[in-house]
Amino acid sequence: MSKRTAVIGAGVMGETLLAGLIRAGRSAESIVVVEKRAERAAELSERYAVEVVADVAAAAAADTVLLVVKPQDMADVLGEIGPSLRPGQLLVSLAAGITTAFVEDHVPEGVAVVRVMPNTPALVDEGMAAISPGTHCDDTHLAEAESLMASVGKVVQIPEKLQDAVTAISGSGPAYVFFVVEAMIEAGVHLGLPRTTAHELAVQTLVGSAAMLRETGEHPAVLREQVTSPGGTTAAALRELEVHGVRAAFLAALEAARDRSRELGS
């Protein structure tokens, strides 16, 4: 009999994981989703042919429970499901800033907890997830958590003390990329390009550049230098970015994201 997986929280990331698991070959019969809104529950049941229940505690019968809820809701959800959990069960938390110690304090002794920081490119199976084991997590639990997240992208294992830094880089990272692309599109319009053309140019440039980074394995500085001719257009543009402190601004931004992750956890 295949292992049962429960998904608590059917927002964007919850549905992303649900869809990814099914695409990766998990049977709909092995998955149960907890969703209290009746209309949303009916939508998910029809779309994925999975069992959808309103009672959080009903998901406790699963071998693995995925908690895909907001950090501020975590204590309440754990209060509902905690008494129904059992030692050896795997609880995977995807809430930003919430430590494994916090989760372990709200569940029975012996429940295996794994902390995960995912990101939204999981929507297109290009996610980046970092996982960290809790006190009672063994290699089997960790492998299961990695398998779950690998259904929607890449996975790395890190010490939990680095999770706030991961949140700053890859968790929040897509927003920085979208911000830069947005700025490029607006600049293109300012320079006289039709908006649709500026959008296509910027997006494909991003896609192509990302593919080069992944496929060549080169350091980004090497690839940047390949585009930068002495005294050329790229050199002129990069000089302006340095003058305006863009590199320093990114460092400050990521530090702010890390600090906010710590605050959420406390």
Image: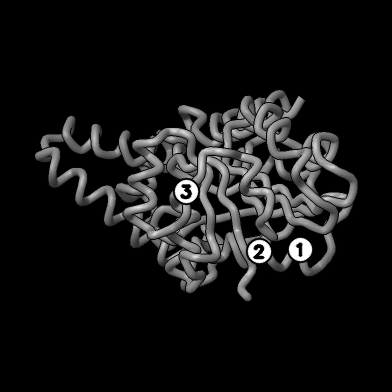
Residue 185 appearing in the image: yes
Q: Which residue occupies the foreground of this view, 26 or 260?
A: 26
Q: Which residue occupies the foreground of this view, 247 or 162?
A: 162
Rate crowding at label 2 as few (under 14), some (14 to 19) or many (20 or more) other CA atoms within 10 Å: many
Image location (x, y in percent) of residue 181: 33, 41
- What's the amino acid at mark 3? Val
Front: mark 3 or 1 = 3
**CB contact under 8 Å: marks 2 and 3:** no
Distance between the Cα atoms at labels 1 and 2?
A: 9 Å
Q: Quadrant of residue 191?
A: top left
Distance between the Cα atoms at labels 2 and 3?
A: 24 Å
- What's the amino acid at mark 1? His
Disc with the residue nearer the chain's start (1 vs 2): 1
Residue 108 position (above or below residue 262): below
Q: Which mark is residue 52?
A: 3
- What's the amino acid at mark 2? Glu
Tell me what residue is drawn at x 51 percent, y 62 percent. Answer: 153
